[in-house]
Amino acid sequence: MSLKERLKKAVASQAEIEADEERADAHRSVGCTPVDQLADRSRASVSGVIRSVTLRPREGVPALEAELYDGSGALDLVWLGRREIGGVTPGRRLKIEGLVCLIDGRRTVFNPRYELRPRPGE
């Protein structure tokens, strides 16, 4: 590691350090695409950590929403007709697959296939 890289790490904020760790973990997941490279109306696999989970009805239908973060950006996940999903909680790592679409300028996947992944240290 060069002196420049060591100095950068020494002065990095906690958020920058966490983003670097998430990018490294997502990069190790074979076949996954970074969130910042996802194109509208494309099928993709993404790996990251859930930052938030919210129950937000859409047009009278229950909808569980989660924000998945991979270090390069955030992806909204929406499961229609669900009030909760066991294991889908903040801090949990997920690998998802689905069709990416832009909703109000945010990358979103509706009803993604998902795989729960171990938390760091598990």
Image (spheres, helix red, strand yellow):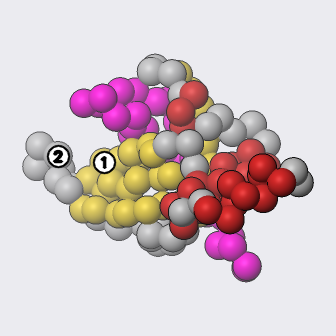
Q: Kindly report the distance in space between the C-alpha atoms of the residues bearing marks 2 and 1.
A: 8 Å
Residue 110 visible (yes or no): yes
**Residue underneath mark 2:** 58
Does residue 3 show up magenta in the picture?
A: no
Q: Nearer the viewer, residue 99 or 5?
A: 5
- Identify the residue under disc 1: 80
Give the magenta part as a residue range. Answer: 95-122
User: In which image quadrant can residue 20 be found?
Assistant: bottom right
Determine if residue 95 is in view: no
Q: Compared with residue 58, is residue 31 higher up or lower down, i.e. above or below? A: above
Image quarter hosting the C terminus: bottom right
Residue drawn at (51%, 52%), measured in percent from left and top? 69
Residue 114 lies, in percent from the top left, at 57, 52
Q: Residues within 10 Å of mark 1 (few under 14, many from 20)?
A: some
Whether residue 114 sits left or right of residue 40 in the image: it is: right
Q: Are marks 2 and 1 in contact (CB under 8 Å)?
A: yes
The circle drawn on residue 68 is: none
Residue 93: x and y, percent? Answer: 59, 63
At a point 40% along the width and 53% down the height, the residue shown is 67
Q: Is residue 1 left or right of residue 61?
A: right
Q: Looking at the image, is mark 2 or mark 1 earlier in the sequence?
A: 2
Is residue 76 positioned above or below 92 on the image?
Answer: above
Count of picture labels: 2
On whether residue 117 falls in the magenta region, the answer is: yes
Residue 7: percent from left, percent from top: 73, 58
Q: What kind of residue is marked 1? A: Leu
**Main secondary structure type of the part rendered in magenta:** strand
- Residue type at the position of mark 2: Arg
Which type of secondary structure does the marked residue at label 2 adopt?
Answer: loop
Q: Which residue is located at x 59 percent, y 32 percent?
A: 44
